[in-house]
Amino acid sequence: MSNGMIFDLPVDWTGENPGVYLKDDPSGPWTTLASFFRIFASPKGQGTALLLLASPNDEFGTDSAPNVCITDNEPLARWLVNDFAANFAFFRDTPSIPAITYVGLDSSKQGGDALTTYSETVSGGGYDVRLDWKGLGEPFGMVVPPDSAPTGKHTFLSMFVGTDGGTVTLNGAPLPGQPVPRDAFGRQITSAFLAFSEIWMRHD
């Protein structure tokens, strides 16, 4: 007899969602927010989306510090931003979320070995964005119930990897800020982290 478990819940999406969230002052506002989605299955199909808020506290951003989402599946990206990322603690209540500009993705490339370093590079709409993580820690698994999930209506499973540092580069120029300490359900990591093998299951 099997001792396995099946979650009898609809799966909204499964994929990857690493992030690099930066501050100039650990007690101050976020200066750069970048969240990368690579979705393998969802009701809106597969796709890649990089959400970059280079001016998270400015509704419309600027030419040199845009608030943009680069994607190859805009309906999927809008759903991820509005139904998921907008509920993440890092993005919640940021005035720039409703005014994000969506642009088409030209290319997306992974780098590093996911043991010591990792990177995601995305280009589109005249933007070249690179996210870098270094000093990768030991992976750990999580199961998060709805009362602790950002959306309040999902159980999600994930493998997290904390890092010592992370950077965001836009068109060759580093964006401001440094990662800050973060608590991940009792595990101390930073706000630059990898999140792989995510499965978000909805409680109706």
Image (cartoon, grey):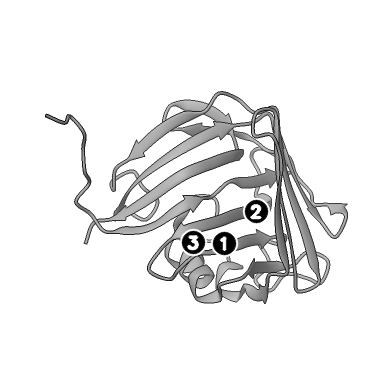
**Residue matched to label 3:** 86
Query: Does the CB distance between marks 2 and 1 fall below 8 Å?
Result: yes
The image quadrant where one finds the C terminus is bottom left
Of residue 118 and residue 31, the one placed in the foreground of this image is 118
20 relative to 188 in the view: left or right: right
Badge 2 crowding class, 10 Å Cα cut-off, few under 14, some 14 to 19, many 20 or more, is many
Circle number at residue 3 = none
Q: Which residue is mark 1?
A: 94
Point out the frontmost of discs 1 and 3: 3
Q: Picture coordinates of residue 130 (x, y %)? A: 76, 52
Mark 1 crowd level (few <14, some 14–19, many ≥20, 10 Å Cα): some
Secondary structure, mark 3, is helix
Q: Helix, strand, or loop for circle 1? A: loop
**Gap between marks 1 and 3, in whole Å?**
8 Å
Q: Earlier in the sequence, mark 1 or mark 3?
A: 3
User: Hey, what amino acid is under mark 2?
Assistant: Leu
Quadrant in the rendering for residue 185: top left
How many angstroms separate mark 2 from mark 3 (CA)? Answer: 12 Å
Query: Hey, which quadrant is residue 202 in on the image?
Result: bottom left
Taking the view exactly as shown, the residue that stands out farthest to the top is: 138
Amino acid marked by disc 1: Thr
Q: Quadrant of the N terminus?
A: top left
Identified by mark 3, the residue type is Ala
Pick whichever, 198 or 59, lies toward us.
198
Q: Which residue is mark 2?
A: 33
